[in-house]
Amino acid sequence: MLEGTQIGDSISVSGACLTVIEIGSSSFTVEVMPETLRTTTLGEMSVGAPLNLERALGAGGRLGGHMVNGHVDWVGQVVSVRREENAVLIDIRVPFELARYIVPKGSIAVDGISLTVVSAAGDAFSVSAIPHTLEETTLGYASAGTRVNIEVDIIAKYVEAMLKEGTGKGRLEEALEREGFISDEGS
């Protein structure tokens, strides 16, 4: 993990992108700001608690999942964990305002782990994890009540922002109209 790491590098700690401020022989130090403590589980961690650690993607590297920024949106709570053949199905409840960004077969990051949404309804969604993922990440420790960091798909948030009307048409709507894909006729 630390090979090639320099002060100022970003490392995802259970899904939260943090900046390395000090490097030891077998450890690194980060500072955590109040916003991160408010919107993640990092303030609840105890010494020795298991963490998911991932270095930032280097330019030209393979994207082994979807785009995960390490910008945790909020904390969700595991509702249930149940075996399904060779996998484990994990149901998670999130704040209702995040649920609109979560769709079946869409992307989600749970504690920084890039996953595919199996199903989504109301304020809950489910993901499925194979044994390798359970063994190599903190998902293997998840049980009902476990709090997890949730990062929804950034593309969904950008699309929503572009569609918002505000004082007039959203930016996406204006661009589509300008390029002739939609028309103002009849409105």
Image: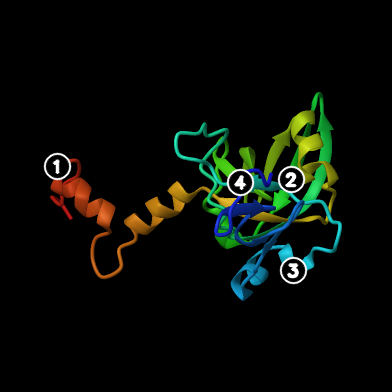
Q: Residues within 10 Å of mark 1 (few under 14, many from 20)?
A: few
Determine the secondary structure under disc 1. loop
Q: Quadrant of the N terminus?
A: top right
Comes first in the chain, label 4 or label 3: 3
Q: Residue at x 65, y 71 (%)?
A: 38
Report the residue marked by disc 3.
Answer: 43
Of 13 and 182, nearer the camera is: 13
What's the distance in space between the residues labelled 1 and 3, CA to CA? 50 Å
Comes first in the chain, label 3 or label 2: 3
Q: Position of residue 152 (x, y in %)?
A: 55, 51
Q: Position of 47 compared to 166: left or right? A: right
Determine the secondary structure under disc 3. helix
Q: Position of 41 compared to 169: left or right? A: right
The residue type indicated by label 1 comes to Gly
Comes first in the chain, label 1 or label 3: 3
What's the distance in space between the residues labelled 2 and 4, CA to CA? 27 Å
Q: Position of residue 26 (x, y in %)?
A: 77, 51
The residue type indicated by label 3 comes to Gly
Indicate which label's residue lies in the foreground, 2 or 4: 4
Q: Position of residue 3 (x, y in %)?
A: 65, 43
What's the distance in space between the residues labelled 4 and 1, CA to CA? 43 Å
Q: Residues within 10 Å of mark 4 (few under 14, many from 20)?
A: some
What's the distance in space between the residues labelled 2 and 1, CA to CA? 43 Å
Report the residue marked by disc 1.
Answer: 180
**Vertical order, 141 against 94 (above or below):** above
Report the residue marked by disc 2.
Answer: 91
What's the distance in space between the residues labelled 4 and 3, CA to CA? 21 Å
Q: Are marks 2 and 4 in contact (CB under 8 Å)?
A: no
Report the residue marked by disc 4.
Answer: 55
